[in-house]
Amino acid sequence: MPKLHIFLSIYYVYLLELNFFLMIVAFVLNRKYVREIFTAIGRKYTLILILIALFGVCATAFVAPRIHRIYYDEDIYNNIGQSIAACKRAVVCNEAYYENNELIIVGREYNKQPIGFPFLTSIAFRLFDTNDSLVFILNNFLYGFAAIVVFLICYLLFKDVFTASCACLFYVLIPVNLQWFNTCAAEPSTTFFAGLAILASLIYIRNKKPVNLFFLITALAFSFNFRPESFLIFFVVGLLFLLKDIGILMRKEFYIYAALLLILSSGIIIHTHAMRGQSWGATGSKFDLDYFYNNFKTNSLFYLDNKSFPLMFSILAIAGLLFYKNRECFREKIVLLGWFTAFWGIFLFFYAGSYEFGQDVRFSLLSYVPFSIFGGLGASFIKNLLENKVKSFTLILILLVMFNFTWFLPFIRAEGDEAWEARTGRKYAVEFAKLLPDNSIIFTHTPNIFLLNKRSAIQSSSETYNPGIIKQHLERFKGGVYVDFNYWSNVEDPEQRGLTENILNRYNYQMIKEYHWRNYKYGLYKITGQKDAVEK
């Protein structure tokens, strides 16, 4: 690895460890101010909030399928988390061994994505050992916490518990939200920590205490580390202070904590510099005006199609934006609109920014918090309009929303056919990992899947670029040397196919397990010896 990548793989981990610890300390120091908010809300609405959050956790965990949806990014995230937990290094393992339940990394590389989410998974792995089920559970609980954050942001902005309750309820009922919070993707945590930074800002604006600013700075710095566009929340926070508390610039503590923000953000700043030449899979420009029209059309109609996003929520959001207390709440609406525009608009110029491009609908998650709050405003506007004319309006609204939600349950439960080749390959890889004996190693295009299942693994390319390495491993690993015939072994790219074919052409092997699905083959083979040696 380049020296800068080696430095980042170590420095970035310890910096996030410091940032996370300071954020927890800051939250503890601010518990008094958080408790004051819940006291103002009252027990009734606090109970409603808890019930909505628990409903969200249960709905995403037990209604949406627990699957990976981005191949093979989610395994990469988890493997980096595994490396951080075991070796304090933010790296993807290309070659690693499990000896006495200890991960020993031999071949590694630094990943292009920020390491905020892998760092979170590493905490779960440190506490409970490596198991990707923990990552699903982590995202499930983040859904409940995100719902609470939505409620609190809405309440602090508009001082209306009904509006905040509706916004929270709408948030947990968004179908795509439910699907993606039951994956190992990074977008759920991106959304949660961006929301936490806004909440911390509002707590500071409410109380103006240095300890509140400490919480804001640590939460904001941490929120930068999840996706490349996570830094946009900085501008949303700036807009919030510009409209609600520009006087912060006159306070001495602001400049002290601004220096702390710069220090805590140094990891993502250096990471962004190191990754500046990445293509991110684009064959042409990553960002270009040419992508705008198609992405704008697709990503706008997404909120209106009533297939993957409830049209009812969109109508309420538009009503909230246009009609809810325009004079009294103009600045608050501008902040929400700026938040939505930043995280929706950035993808309009991105080559893979269309919500219909593969599984990139996950990018829409970043816009749901402000959108849900606008929906809450719309519900409150209609309530104020009809409450005196329609008895039990609140109950009718809740029943209507829940009844409408049932139309989306088949969509939420669907796994989809996208990336079926990779999905099937991953399923069999997990099965193959369970068949491998102790003190064995497998040659595969995706070592991280096997390492997460605590089996030694090495890139298939190793034999191509270092002929004879399998022979060396036959002597070392008494449990056997195996080959994974996987998704990449089937693709049309001759280079990728050749990495597996080179091994099977040079060595004798025994078939342990083989599957055929559609026009793809997946297999586990055990190397029994070198062909040249047998022929002689």
Image (cartoon, rainbow, N blue to C red):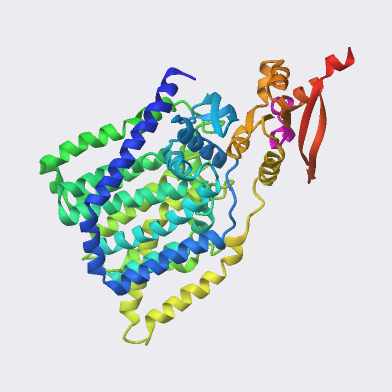
For this rendering, which residue is in front, 74 or 512? 512
Which residue is located at x 45 percent, y 50 percent? Answer: 188
For this rendering, which residue is in front, 527 or 397? 527
Q: What residue span does the magenta drawing correspond to?
A: 484-498
Q: Is residue 393 left or right of residue 485?
A: left
- Image coordinates of residue 57 in percent, x first then y, are 47, 61
Which residue is located at x 40 percent, y 40 percent? Answer: 229
Confirm whether residue 250 shows in the render.
yes
- Image coordinates of residue 300 in percent, x first then y, are 48, 55
Q: Would you say the magenta stretch is mainly helix, strand or loop? A: helix
Q: Is residue 118 above or below residue 393?
A: above
Residue 83 inside the magenta-drawn segment: no
Which residue is located at x 28 percent, y 55 percent? Answer: 334
- Name the outermost residue toward the front: 100
Q: Is residue 395 left or right of residue 251?
A: right
The quadrant of the image that shows the C terminus is top right
Q: Quadrant of residue 395?
A: bottom left
Q: Is residue 160 above or below residue 203?
A: below
Residue 497 inside the magenta-drawn segment: yes
Q: Quadrant of residue 322?
A: bottom left
Q: Is residue 196 left or right of residue 171?
A: left
Q: Is residue 128 left or right of residue 417?
A: left
- Image coordinates of residue 200 in percent, x first then y, are 26, 51
Which residue is located at x 18 percent, y 47 percent? Answer: 211
For this rendering, which residue is in front, 172 or 434? 434
Confirm whether residue 519 shows in the render.
no
- Name the outermost residue toward the top: 536
Q: Is residue 63 above or below residue 119?
A: below
- Image coordinates of residue 28 in percent, x first then y, are 26, 51
